[in-house]
Image (cartoon, rainbow, N blue to C red):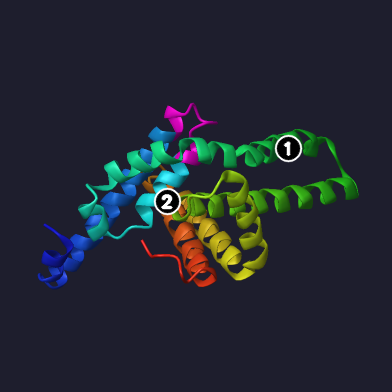
Amino acid sequence: MNTEAQLGLGWTGRVMQLLNAACTLVLVNLLFAAGTLAGLGVLGIMPAGAAAASVLLRDSTTLEREGGATRVFVRAYRRSFLRANLAGIPFLAAAALLAADALVLPRLTGPAAAVLTTLTVAIALAALLTGIVVVTLLERYDDPPAALLRYAVTVTLTSPATGAGVVVALAACGLIALAVPVFAPLAGASVPLAIAVRLIDRRLAHLDPAHPNH
């Protein structure tokens, strides 16, 4: 049953739409995990994120017209694989730096520990926000990875309200996962990513109103 038919059923149609949206989120969560594993983790997480964003930025009608969430995900994963991994190189470097900090921090005390902890948190948040911007840009634009990275950094630095909204949404999802353990395996990646990419996409639409909508 398509979206128009569901809307014609009144509140029953609304419930069906909510169930359909929930099923899509669970499916995207599974596809994201599969895409990450298919790239052996390091080579899979960025294209899987871009492909998940491609699905999550489309409404149900568009997904139906394009063959369903799985087909949209697979097409986007294949299309963005090289660009996403090239754009992801700086984030691998940031991850290595954060891992090194995590090893050093327990051995430090006093002011040095406080400074390094603050720096580590700042780098982690900046890398996370910029990475989500990149996967959103991969869906919107066909530019080379270097251009996407420059634009992603600019967007992150000039959009503090959007960044704060993303951080709050991610923190809320983390709290939900702690309170409801089943949330993480079902939609632990797709729900926070859905909120984040839509917030960022709205900001990008404001910055580039001439760009066609999804």
The answer to whether mark 1 and mark 2 are in CB contact below 8 A is no
Please tell me which residue is depicted at 56% across the width and 46% down the height of the picture: 144
Question: Which mark's residue is nearer the viewer, 1 or 2?
Answer: 2
Q: Is residue 123 visible?
A: yes
Closest to the observer, 73 or 146: 146
- Above/below status of 183 relative to 12: above
Q: In which quadrant will I find the N terminus?
A: bottom left
Where is residue 199 drawn, in percent x and y?
48, 64
Q: Which residues are magenta?
A: 36-47
- SS assignment at label 1: helix
**Numbered mark located on residue 53 in the image:** 2
Q: Label 1 amino acid?
A: Leu
User: Which amino acid type corresponds to the residue marked 2 in the rendered image?
Assistant: Ala
In the rendered image, residue 90, in percent from the top left (x then y), is placed at: 66, 41
The spot of residue 151 in percent (x, y) is: 61, 57
The front one of 193 and 47 is 47
In-image side of 53 versus 19 (left or right):
right
**CA gap, disc 1 and disc 2:** 26 Å
**Residue 43 within the segment the image draws in magenta:** yes
Mark 1, residues whose alpha carbon is within 10 Å: few (<14), some, or many (≥20)?
A: some
